[in-house]
Image (cartoon, rainbow, N blue to C red):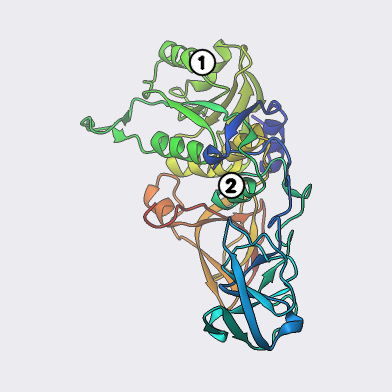
Amino acid sequence: MTLLPVDEARARMLAEVPAPVTERVPVAESVGRVLAEDVAAVRDQPPFDASAMDGYAVRSADAPGTLKVVGESAAGHGYAGEVRPGEAVRIFTGAAIPQGCDAVVIQEDVQRDGDTATVPAVEAGRHVRLAGGDFRAGQALLARGTTIDPWRLSLAAAAGRAELTVARRPRVALFSTGEEIVEAPATPGPFQIYDSGSPALAALIRGWGGEVRRARPVRDDLEATIEALRAAEGDLVVTLGGASVGDHDLVRKAGEALGLELKVASVAVRPGKPTFFGVLGDGRRMLGLPGNPASAFVCAEMFLRPLLMAWQGAPAEPRAISARLEEALPANGPREHWMRARLAFEGGGVTVRPYRDQDSSLVSVFALADALLRRPAQAPAAEAGSVVDVLPLSRLPSGA
């Protein structure tokens, strides 16, 4: 089989992703969705000059002085009249600045006596939020391809949007294969292990915007694998295990029985060499991942995440950052190596330390890692302090 470089393999996969299908959703339900439209403001924000503090709206030309308090302006209830020389209006944070006023004196600096208020000198514009200070009517606020988070949701709501046009979530069918796999709480046999890969991949798929349907593990039987593949409903079928070409690796053969056209046969990556991708006879895309969890998770970051992002019209390329090695590394071999590693942020810089044991079966190491360190194919030995590329891994906030 031809081993493709990681970037070329990813490009071939992404070339098979169709244009996003769109739908309308309420703004309040849009977190995690990818915009399929540009969002612009329908009016200025704030739509009027507003007070930034509780206090008194005044004409700066009248300060310092003792002024007559002629009314009140509160959020949602402005002062309707025009403030004349020698007058002031009691005002609260967020309320509209009355016509004629150009400054606010905070209440702590004012001496109030009945219907008069003695104020100190104040410059024009003091404690005033100008109309349009956040954004202007017609201003572009959010671009197509942006993933909505709570802060962007707030911006869309402030822009006056009740609904947004977003990409439909890609539908992913997921199943693992292998006689050795058993799902908890079933009791494993003497030569079996618990399925730790597919539940984690299902969570990753949901976090990357996909709708996942997870099937039960499939035993090492060609007809059973063909039937599981035929029954898998989704835009993308993701299999875990059985991706290589050994006697018990039946996923490719099952795909071929259903018209699989391979676009990527294998990848020059460590771990994850057996990863393949193609299009089934009925048009469903298929991504075959290795069975070892670390291999599957690395290749999910390299290929599955970009596929799901592209399906939604979002930026698809992994975003690496630079970091300095905390310790020396030996020369690398012929395959690009993505090592599980730990980042540290000190003195304004980023350092990275790879874990010593990179065996692809170790789930515990991935649970500790917060980055993948890239070693290019045939990279020479690297000294401590050398700059390397790392891909930070997303982690949910503590307690989420």
Element type at mark 1: helix
Where residue 377 appears, as percent x and y from the top left, is: 66, 50
| The N terminus lies in quadrant | top right
Residue 334 visible to the viewer: no
Q: Which amino acid does label 2 sit on?
A: Leu
Residue 276 visible in this rendered orientation of the protein: yes
Observer-nearest residue: 250 or 98?
Answer: 98
Name the residue located 49 percent from the left edge and 42 percent from the top edge.
297
What residue would you read off at disc 2? 153
Of the two numbered discs 1 and 2 in the rendering, the one whose residue sits closer to the viewer? 2
Kindly report the distance in space between the C-alpha atoms of the residues bearing marks 1 and 2. Answer: 44 Å
**Residue 235 on image: x %, y %:** 58, 22
Numbered label attached to residue 230 = none
User: How many numbered tags mark residues here?
Assistant: 2
Label 1 vs 2, first from the N-terminus: 2
Tell me if residue 275 comes above or below residue 41 in the rendering. above
- Residues at circles 1 and 2 in contact by the CB criterion of under 8 Å: no
- Tell whether 184 sits left or right of 376: left
Residue in the image at 73% along x and 44% along y: 42
Q: Is mark 2 on a helix, strand or loop?
A: helix
Q: Where residue 87 sits in the image (x, y, percent)? A: 68, 76
Residue that carries the numbered disc 1 in the rendered image: 254
Question: Which of 98/168 is in front?
Answer: 98
Q: Is residue 232 above or below residue 53?
A: above
Neighbour class for label 2 at 10 Å: few (<14), some, many (≥20)?
A: many
Taking depth in this image into account, of 162 and 331 the one nearest to the observer is 162
Q: Quadrant of residue 373?
A: bottom right
Whether residue 240 sits left or right of residue 72 in the image: it is left
Question: Residue 291 in the image: x percent, y percent?
Answer: 44, 34
Q: Which residue is drawn at 54% across and 29% down?
A: 288
Amino acid type, label 1: Ala
